[in-house]
Amino acid sequence: MAFPARIALAVLLLAMPAAAQELLPTQNVPPDKTLANDTVTTSTNALPNSEDLPANNALPSSSLLPDKPAPQGNFLTRPFYDKKVRLLAELNAGAAVMDDVASRMVIESGGYERNPLMRPFVHNSGTLVVESAGEVWLMAFLGDRMKHSSHPLLRKTWWLPQVLNFSAKFSGGIYNSVLLAK
């Protein structure tokens, strides 16, 4: 962090009162009106007495604070809690299975993998399945992160990584199926 930024952070932290979010029970109460000797007097001190304040400037009881929402899922399962992301991930997984099965059938019948990035994975079914599952999860994670981004363009195009991956896998599966039909 640059030196001016550290100074600004220190000033901001020191300028804030220690109990800025403390809710005192009598903060919003209008001044007390008492009747003494047939005259109306208004008390100007609306703050509580020292015995009413919590000890050690502690936070108010937990009943006054809002409940913290429980986190939904973990790092691996969070993208799949959104229904739209999950639907695209399911379509993506189906297209990946179609492409993987057709690719394996083409390779077993004497063909070869033309994609140099996929070539190391297609000779073993286990590595092919792990690669495809990882790719589906990565696209769902990327789509979920884009959907919750602070940038409007990313929020509007959150579906794009999953749709592009789906179309690539689906067209690959169709291409391999056509090769098998010849």
Image: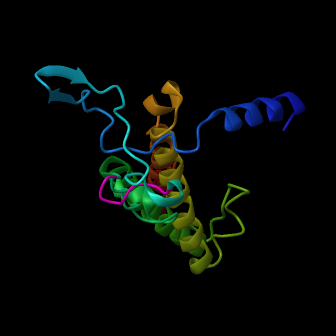
Q: Closest to the observer: 62 or 114?
A: 62
Check the image and name the residue furthest to the front.
Answer: 37
Q: Nearer the viewer, residue 171 or 8?
A: 8
Q: Is residue 109 in view?
A: no
Query: Is 135 placed above or below 145 here?
Result: below
Q: Which residues are magenta?
A: 58-64
For this orientation, the residue located farthest to the top is: 39
Residue visible at 66% across and 70% down in the picture: 121
Picture coordinates of residue 65, whole percent (x, y): 35, 52
Q: How many marks?
A: 0
Q: Residue at the right extreme?
A: 3
The quarter of the rendered structure image containing the N terminus is top right
Residue drawn at x 55%, y 56% is 138
Q: Is residue 86 left or right of residue 172?
A: left
- Here the colouring is rainbow
Residue 142 shows in this picture: yes
Q: Main secondary structure of the magenta part?
A: loop
Q: Is residue 180 above or below residue 9?
A: below
Name the side, left or right, on which 15 lies relative to 86: right
Give the left or right position of residue 35, taking residue 25 as reference: left
The spot of residue 105 in percent (x, y) is 51, 71
Up-down: is 167 above or below 86? Answer: above
Image location of residue 106, percent across then percent down: 55, 67
Residue placed most toward the observer, 156 or 106 = 156
Examine the structure image and report whether residue 144 is included in the region drawn in magenta.
no
Taking 14 as reference, is 165 left or right? left
Residue 75 at x, y = what percent? 52, 63
Q: Nearer the viewer, residue 85 or 37?
A: 37
